Amino acid sequence: MVLIEQRAGGTALSGVSVDTVAARMRALRASLPPKDGLAVFNRVYLAVTEEIGRSVARGAFDDPRAAATLDVLFAGRYLRAVDAVAAGLRPPACWRPLFQYRRHPGVRPLQFALCGINAHIGHDLALAVVDSCRALECEPEGLERDFERVGDTLVALEERVREELMPGPDLLEVADPLTHLLASWSLERARDAAWSSARLLWRLRELPDLSREFRERMDAGVGLVGRCLLTPYAGPSSARGVHSWRSGSDSAFRR
């Protein structure tokens, strides 16, 4: 088990490992109703984290310490968003759609899963690469091979998620519009964009104003995509339940 001893991104990481963050996700899984949108994404992400932990243990990465550092810092950004909402605070814009619509009866499980993946890859991954470079005192290029291996794990899992969570042929009226909506988003393209963003942010670290502006725009843009991914399906069963659903708005989060 690889332990992370550095401090990065303003968060103390002493003694934290991939197993530690996986245990936190398991506890979260146990505390959430299965149909909660956050629970859907958490199950997907837990599977990713456990697979990466196994890969680190069997030596599949060129640098196990670097891979574990990236994974822990990456997961930490998701878990901090969860903690922020639990405390009544506003999470990053990229995560707000998932938390606001997590109980909407017209949103399918696959949409929740991809909305969370979009937030985590489109926003958190680039920042986690920068955090890892600071912690490991290396350039982004030093993490590229392990970044690609983590990305390959995510892509393989996305394919499985789409197969398992897409409504079956008995719900073609749901599956058809979902197919069109979700085909517009690609994890591979999001991963490529995250790598480019990480490299750019690394170059901008000496220009804090520009770096902050870029992060804010990236956050907002990913949040907009996430909101589109959660477009509800207004089927009969959804219509019956929608009156009891209340969207969490920004007013639900304290600054």
Image: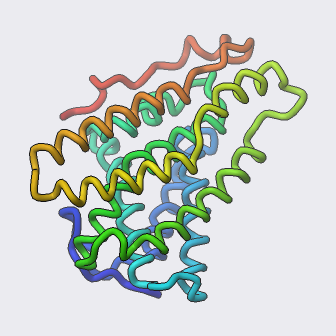
Number of marks? 0
Quadrant occupied by the C terminus:
top left
Question: Which residue is at the far right?
Answer: 170
Relative side of 38 to 82, left or right: right
Q: Which residue is drawn at 46% across and 19% down?
A: 246
> Would residue 94 be visible to someone looking at this image?
yes
x%, y% of residue 203?
A: 21, 58
Relative side of 170 to 57, left or right: right
111 in relation to 81, above or below: above
Which is nearer the eye, 62 or 123? 62
Picture quadrant of residue 74 = bottom left
Q: Residue at x 27, y 32 (%)?
A: 253
176 in relation to 79, above or below: above
Which is nearer the eye, 201 or 60? 201
> Would residue 36 be visible to someone looking at this image?
no
Relative side of 226 to 142, left or right: right
x%, y% of residue 102?
A: 51, 33
27 in relation to 34, above or below: below
x%, y% of residue 15?
A: 32, 82
Report the coloring of the rendering: rainbow
x%, y% of residue 181?
A: 64, 26
Q: Which residue is drawn at 49% across and 56% down?
A: 28
Picture quadrant of residue 152 = bottom right
